[in-house]
Image (cartoon, helix red, strand yellow):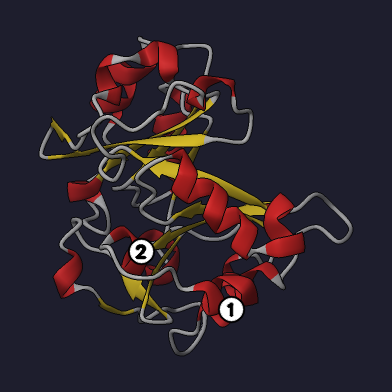
Amino acid sequence: MLDLAGGQVVRGVRGERAAYRPIVSRLVAGSDPVAIAAALLATQVPDGPARPLYVADLDAIQGRAPQLESLRRLLALRLELWLDAGLPGPAAAAALLRAFGADAGRVRLVYGSESLAAGAPIEDLAGDPRAILSLDCRLERPLDPAGLWRRPALWPRTLIAMTLDRVGAAAGPDLATLARLRALAPDRAWIGAGGVRDAADLRAAASAGATGWLVASALHDGTLALE
């Protein structure tokens, strides 16, 4: 998982984006996105399938232009990019994919519920096999202008339960929110985000039904080892 701002990887803490600073990591010196991504993907199996890397383009999420140069550099690595770029709706998604040209097939766009506009034509999300919906919340309150938290029939096959106030906070995964959402759509692939401190947290998340969990700080701090 990478938080990207101004062409650098930054450390996300509790979703307070104005306070984010360039990452300091035990994995590699500096905050260059390609160097950080390569370190995170160091256990990539030769000739194996592309390993997904989740990237939050914080410039785009905050209403600025997407960081296309940095994103293209990341795509030059052998990976599949899960990209949250603050998409307000499907039209913006189509335009962003066109900007990646031949690499678009290795980009899965993440629709963040905090970014989807009220009234956006989102009825086709459920039928898009590559769409990922991030159900975002802060302090147990959904961030949801489009009202998707209440419409599980529109959810695609891959979902992220994103608790922003636990990101980078070493507070443990929000298994209660995961359980509440998963009960509405137990047949989906559920990815959690925020709070993981160590391998025990990942085991607890798996036992709670998570397919996976987005992790950054625990890897950079060395409390969770790459395997």
Is 189 situated left or right of 222 in this image?
Answer: right
* Quarter location, residue 130: top right
* Residue 110 on image: x %, y %: 47, 44
Residue under label 1:
34
Residue under label 2:
60
Say if 132 sits above or below 170 in the image.
Answer: above
Residue 173 or residue 189, whichever sits in front: 189
* Quarter location, residue 217: bottom left
The residue lying at 67 percent from left, 67 percent from top is 75
* Residue 39 on image: x %, y %: 60, 73
Q: In whole angstroms, how far apart are the C-alphas of marks 1 and 2?
A: 19 Å
The residue lying at 53 percent from left, 12 percent from top is 187
Placement of the C terminus among the 4 image quadrants:
bottom right
* Quarter location, residue 19: bottom left
Asked whether the viewer can see residue 119, the reply is yes
Residue 115 or residue 14, whichever sits in front: 115
The furthest residue to the right:
47
Identified by mark 1, the residue type is: Val
Identified by mark 2, the residue type is: Ala
Residue density around tag 2, few if under 14, some if 14–19, many if 20 or more, within 10 Å:
some
Disc number for residue 152: none
Is 195 situated left or right of 125 in this image?
Answer: left
